Every structure is written in structure tokens, then in C-alpha cells.
Image: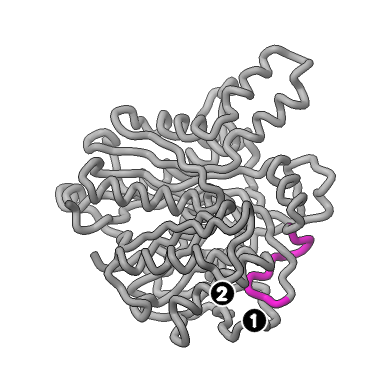
């Protein structure tokens, strides 16, 4: 059994930056990536605000050196960019030197491809290629091919907005059990009409900047992004003399089975997930220095998560904030995006501000961190809660 799950590389592309360095700079400068829709033709483009990535698909293809006849969805393109950065950051030259797997999370998958087929299917039989890129596993397989992973486990997780957190959890368990030596874990989701229309139907999209944990929150901003982390065993770290960015110390998953989309009013699933993560890490609540909250700025989530945090931490709640006011809610990628942000917080001993907050919620007295704060951090807890009640928590630490 491996003692530690080391993080040795990270990669990310989001509305606030095209790599890890740009994302961190935006976080400490309180630079939001939220704007009106510009890259999708939708009747809702003037109704809502989103977190779009600047690159067009053509620019991403050029960045990756893909031929014009490639069959990549935008989800696959974004995921490949982030995964390649993570592998390069980890200094991996021979991806198959050790037993290496890929666990990629997505909810949108190739929906942007399916939408093209829907509107163009009468024009040409070649549009059938769009259907081939529809399923969730297609983007994962394309990322694996681009990385050269061909001898080990490649799989996809789709548990709504907790997907990438669950990818991290599964990767950690595969290393702990000795089944793999190295796992690239994370997630990718692009913007699509399907998700815009779906969330619009749920009436939880904001027409302005999202305001996590604010009494007057109006809903979430959808975002698109991808992020991946390289997890490696102690044996690989030692053999390759790797620099360790942090460790996956604890993790927990629970399902409150309350509603198809809403979390339980008192955060039953979130409470169980946080408690399980603490148990796996061997920590008490007092050992957590900062919580990167799920914080979607919806009426239901922020109330449910806030109550869950109080149930777990009581009066000694550590500083907490949501970073979704920067990026928007990146759906299945959110757990990986915020894992990268959590590791950056650990490395730089900073707590990010909860942007756009003005009014305290009346249901409880805990308030998110409102200004950038320097604080020596040893541990960060990251929450990711999804539709269907799937709640996940991952704890990151500087120490093994």
C-alpha cells in the first residue's frame, strides 16, 4: 500500500487563464472571466452571463497541431490542452514507463458536436462524424491518444458537478491499492446550447455576475474549462526524484438521494462527504485551514452547503470561499479546476476572496472570506456537489 498520493503536475484552461500561471494571477488580482455569451448563437445570449474561454476551436486545433479533418469536440480540445500541460509540468517524458491511467470527467461530452449534426444533418452525410464524438468517453479516449497512454486504464466519470472530484478520488484509490503507479485525473466541459437551455429551464441562471453565499444571490453563471492533475505513487516520486506540489490526503463521496437536482435543505450528503474525507485523512475538523467551497450562488446550494459546513465545523469554521465567481460553474470540470486552485493556495499560502459578496445570508452567521488573505496553509478542503445528490469532498495537504 502506498503511503502518499503525490501531485506532481497540473494543467488548466478556463475563462480566467489558458494555463496554471495565468489562472493564479487572475485569482490573486480578483480578475473575473464572466461576460455575455459571444461564441454560441443562442436566444439567451443577452439574458445570462457565462465564463467563456477566449480560444476558438480552430485556435485550439492549431495549438494542438491537429489536422483540419480532426473529429474533436470542444470538450476534447480543452481537455487535451490541460492534460498536456499537466504531463509536461510533471516532467514526464515516457508516459508508459510506469503503469499509468487516465480518468477524465465530463457531463457535456460531445454535445457541441451533436448540435452541429442536429442543424446540418440534411446537408451532408459527412455530418454523421459528429455523432461519433457525442458520447462522454470519446473526449477521454482522444485525450489518452494525444498523451500516448495505450497500456493501462482509461475511463470516464460522469456524476454531474462532482465528476472531477470523483476522478481524483478514484485515481488516488487506484494508486493506494497498487493497481496503478501514476494517474492523470481531472475533467473537461465545454459550453453548449444543451447546457444553456437545460439550466435555463431549471431557472437557476443569473443575468449578472454570480454572488456565492450572498443573501440576494440570483443563480449561477455557466462556465467552460478543463483541468488535470498528475497523481503519482511514493515509489515513482522517489525513483524519479520528483518535486511534489501537494498530496491527496483524504476524500469522501456520499449521496443524500433528496432530489433530482437539489441538495437536501440541511446538507446531509455534503456533511457525510466532508466527514468521510476527514476520516480517510485521519484529520479532525480543526485540522482544515481553508475550504474551497462548491458555492454555486444558487439559492439551494449555498444554503445547503453552508449548513453542512456548520454541522461539520461548528463555531470554529475555517476561512472559506467559492471561486466560481471567477470562472463560472464549470460543471464536471469544477472539482479539477478547484483542485488546482486548492494546490495553488497551499503552495502560495493564500486564501482567495469570495467575489461579489454584499449581503450576509439570514439563515446563518458564517461569512466567506472577502479579501485576498495571506495565511500559512497546511490543508485545504475542496467541495464538489452534483445533481442527483452526488456529493464529494477532497482534502489536499502539504504533508504526506
| Element type where label 2 sits in the image | helix
Q: Return the residue found at the far top.
A: 125
Q: Is residue 13 above or below residue 362?
A: above
- The residue at 28%/56% (across/down) is 6
Which residues make up the magenta segment? Answer: 205-215
Disc 1 marks which residue?
Answer: 363
Residue 286 location, quadrant: bottom left
Q: Is residue 261 above or below residue 118?
A: below
User: Mark 1: few, some, or many residues within 10 Å (few <14, many ≥20)?
Assistant: few
- The residue at 19%/58% (across/down) is 3
Disc 2 marks which residue?
Answer: 306
C-beta proximity under 8 Å, tags 1 and 2: yes
| Element type where label 1 sits in the image | loop
Give 5 or 301, whichever is nearer the viewer.
301
Q: Return the residue found at the far front.
A: 258
- The residue at 51%/54% (across/down) is 390
Residue 112 appears left or right of 65 = right
Residue 337 screen position, x and y as percent: 50, 55
Queried whether the magenta region covers residue 212, the answer comes back as yes
> Main SS of the magenta segment?
loop
What scheme was used to colour the molecule?
A: one colour
Amino acid at each position: 500500500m502506498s503511503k502518499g498520493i503525490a501531485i506532481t503536475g497540473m494543467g488548466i484552461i478556463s475563462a480566467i487563464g489558458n494555463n496554471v500561471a495565468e489562472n493564479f494571477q487572475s485569482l490573486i488580482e480578483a480578475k473575473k472571466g464572466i461576460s455575455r455569451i459571444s461564441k454560441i448563437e443562442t436566444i439567451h445570449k443577452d439574458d445570462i452571463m457565462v465564463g467563456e474561454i477566449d480560444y476558438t476551436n480552430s485556435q485550439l486545433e492549431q495549438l494542438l497541431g491537429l489536422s483540419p479533418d480532426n473529429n474533436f469536440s470542444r470538450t476534447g480540445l480543452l481537455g487535451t490542452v490541460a492534460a498536456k500541460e499537466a504531463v509536461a509540468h510533471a516532467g514526464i517524458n515516457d508516459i508508459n514507463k510506469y503503469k499509468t491511467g487516465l480518468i477524465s470527467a465530463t457531463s457535456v461530452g460531445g454535445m457541441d458536436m451533436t448540435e452541429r449534426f442536429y442543424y446540418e444533418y440534411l446537408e451532408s452525410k459527412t455530418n454523421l462524424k459528429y455523432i461519433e464524438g457525442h458520447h462522454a468517453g470519446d473526449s477521454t479516449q482522444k485525450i489518452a491518444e494525444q498523451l500516448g497512454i495505450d497500456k493501462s486504464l482509461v475511463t470516464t466519470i460522469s456524476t454531474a458537478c462532482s465528476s472531477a472530484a470523483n476522478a481524483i478520488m478514484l485515481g488516488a484509490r487506484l494508486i493506494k491499492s497498487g493497481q496503478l503507479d501514476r494517474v492523470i485525473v481531472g475533467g473537461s466541459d465545454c459550453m453548449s446550447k444543451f447546457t444553456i437551455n437545460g439550466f435555463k429551464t431549471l431557472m437557476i441562471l443569473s443575468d449578472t455576475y454570480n454572488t456565492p453565499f450572498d443573501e440576494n444571490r440570483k443563480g449561477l453563471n455557466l462556465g467552460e474549462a478543463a483541468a488535470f492533475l498528475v497523481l503519482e505513487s511514493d515509489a515513482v516520486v522517489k525513483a524519479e526524484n520528483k518535486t511534489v506540489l501537494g498530496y491527496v490526503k483524504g476524500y469522501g463521496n456520499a449521496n443524500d438521494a433528496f432530489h433530482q437536482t437539489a441538495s437536501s435543505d440541511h446538507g446531509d450528503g455534503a456533511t457525510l462527504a466532508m466527514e468521510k474525507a476527514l476520516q480517510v485523512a485521519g484529520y479532525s475538523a480543526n485540522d482544515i485551514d481553508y475550504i474551497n467551497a462548491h458555492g454555486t450562488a444558487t439559492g439551494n446550494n449555498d444554503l445547503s452547503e453552508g449548513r453542512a459546513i456548520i454541522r461539520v465545523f461548528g463555531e470554529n469554521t475555517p476561512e472559506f470561499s467559492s471561486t466560481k465567481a471567477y470562472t463560472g460553474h464549470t460543471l464536471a470540470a469544477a472539482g479539477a479546476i478547484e483542485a488546482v486552485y486548492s494546490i495553488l493556495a497551499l503552495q502560495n499560502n493564500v486564501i482567495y476572496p469570495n467575489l461579489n459578496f454584499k449581503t450576509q445570508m439570514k439563515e446563518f452567521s458564517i461569512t466567506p472570506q472577502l479579501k485576498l488573505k495571506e495565511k500559512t496553509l497546511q490543508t485545504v478542503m475542496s467541495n464538489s456537489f452534483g445533481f442527483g445528490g452526488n456529493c464529494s469532498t477532497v482534502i489536499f495537504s502539504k504533508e504526506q
